[in-house]
Image: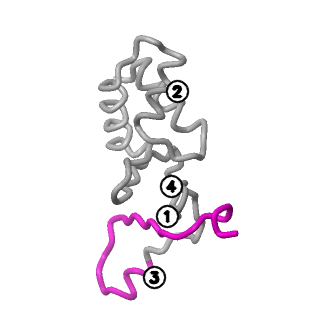
């Protein structure tokens, strides 16, 4: 079922490359639809992730982030400011399979370091 709330959550996630948290998505959605509840945002995010329309980025010791770009890419998590940035290395499936001897169905790679603004 595609509801107005689900469409709004998807719109918020895909309108930016900032990899928003669920709380940030809720705040942006609430500005457009004041009656939306936080639970509705979480429920719709889960459905969108399950449908493969949105990627969930699990960051250790930090809130999960959501990415509207489902093309194969990696992420850099800045240890100083917490920003999450896209990294385009191409599909690493073949290289990982070759190195490990394992058959992958998917992978998620998050690299920790300093973003370009914090590295200076």
Q: Is residue 105 left or right of residue 32?
A: left
Callout 1–callout 4 Cβ contact below 8 Å? no
Label 2 to label 1: alpha-carbon separation:
25 Å
Mark 2 / mark 1, whichever is N-terminal: 2
Q: Position of residue 74 (x, y in %)?
A: 51, 64
In the foreground, 28 or 14: 28
Pointer 2 local density, CA inside 10 Å: few below 14, some 14–19, many at least 20: some
In this rendering, does residue 104 appear at all? Answer: yes
Residue bearing the label numbered 4: 82
In the foreground, 21 or 102: 21
Q: Position of residue 77 (x, y in %)?
A: 50, 61
Label 1 to label 4: alpha-carbon separation:
6 Å
Q: Is residue 118 left or right of residue 83?
A: right
Label 4 to label 2: alpha-carbon separation:
19 Å
Residue bearing the label numbered 1: 79
Identity of the residue furthest to the top in this view: 35
Q: Image height check: is 30 above or below 59? A: above
């Amino acid at each position: 079922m595609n509801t107005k709330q689900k469409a709004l959550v998807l719109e918020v996630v895909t309108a930016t490359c900032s990899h928003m948290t669920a709380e940030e998505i809720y705040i942006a959605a609430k500005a457009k639809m004041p009656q939306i509840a936080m639970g509705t945002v979480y429920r719709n995010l889960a459905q969108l992730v399950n449908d493969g329309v949105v990627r969930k980025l699990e960051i250790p010791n930090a809130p999960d982030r959501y990415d509207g770009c489902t093309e194969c890419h990696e992420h850099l998590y800045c240890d100083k400011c917490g920003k999450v940035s896209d990294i385009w290395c191409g599909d690493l499936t073949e290289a990982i399979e070759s190195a490990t001897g394992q058959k992958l169905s998917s992978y998620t790679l998050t690299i920790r370091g300093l973003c370009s603004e914090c590295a200076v």
